[in-house]
Amino acid sequence: MHWNRTALRWILAGGLLCGSAMAVQAIETGAPAPPYEVRLLDGALFTPSQAVGKVVMLHFWASWCVPCRAEMPAMEQYYRQHHGEGLELIAITVDDAADLEKARVIMRQFSFPAASIQDAKVKGYGRIWRIPLTFVIDRQGRLRLDAWDGDASGITATALDQAITPLLNER
């Protein structure tokens, strides 16, 4: 059975009627991206004000997630090729505190920064329950890729080139 986004919102909103405190917030592709603030594993703070004029990928993953780890080499290659053109990539692990050291060890093989979801303010992107999950924000601060709407086929070099390169070429 295929659920469309509107049906899922109604189901989630129904949880409010059943006493759940969960808030449903719609995010729309093309609209201004929800705010975020991310404390990186190295202690630095990353905010939208630091990303003005850049393309930002917020990528949610976990150390125990095999598909997450499988797509990270393609992300690394793309990041190294395009960081100088204004690409920022933040890998936000959903690992709990007990597994955070595993995430740190994994991230040593990659040059893009990482953060823990415990140190990130990303509520506007919804409850992160499915991973890997990636959002892309363009140079003007608009949400251009909402992973909740996409398929879960994974990130590849070709997919990155098709989705991100046109955004990097926009000025």
Image: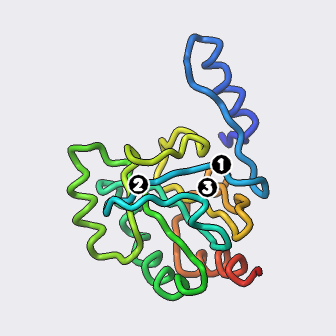
Residue 119, relative to residue 153: is it above or below? above
* Place of residue 52 in the rendered image (x, y in percent of width and height, measured from the top left): 65, 68
Q: Are marks 2 and 3 in contact (CB under 8 Å)?
A: no
Q: Secondary structure at mark 2?
A: strand
Quadrant for the N terminus, please. top right
Q: Which residue is mark 1?
A: 34
Query: For the residues carrying marks 2 and 3, which lies nearer the camera in this image?
Result: 2
Measured as percent of width and height from the top left, residue 36 is found at: 56, 50
Q: What residue type is disc 1 on?
A: Pro
Which of the two labelled residues, at mark 1 and mark 3, occupies the earlier sequence position?
A: 1
Label 2 to label 1, Cα distance in Å?
17 Å
**Residue 159, image x and y in percent?**
60, 75
Reading the image, the residue beneath label 2 is 39
Q: Position of residue 15 (x, y in %)?
A: 60, 19
Against 131, is 144 above or below? Answer: below
Instruction: Give the SS element for disc 3.
Output: loop
Which residue type carries mark 2? Arg
Question: Amino acid under label 3?
Answer: Ala
Mark identifier at residue 148:
none
Q: CA distance from mark 2 to mark 3?
A: 22 Å
The residue depicted at 57 percent of the width and 25 percent of the height is 22
Q: Quadrant of residue 115?
A: bottom left
**If you read the primary sequence from the N terminus, does the residue marked by circle 2 or circle 3 appear first?**
2
CA separation in Å, label 1 and label 3: 14 Å
Q: Residues within 10 Å of mark 1 (few under 14, many from 20)?
A: some
Where residue 147 is drawn, which disc sits there? 3
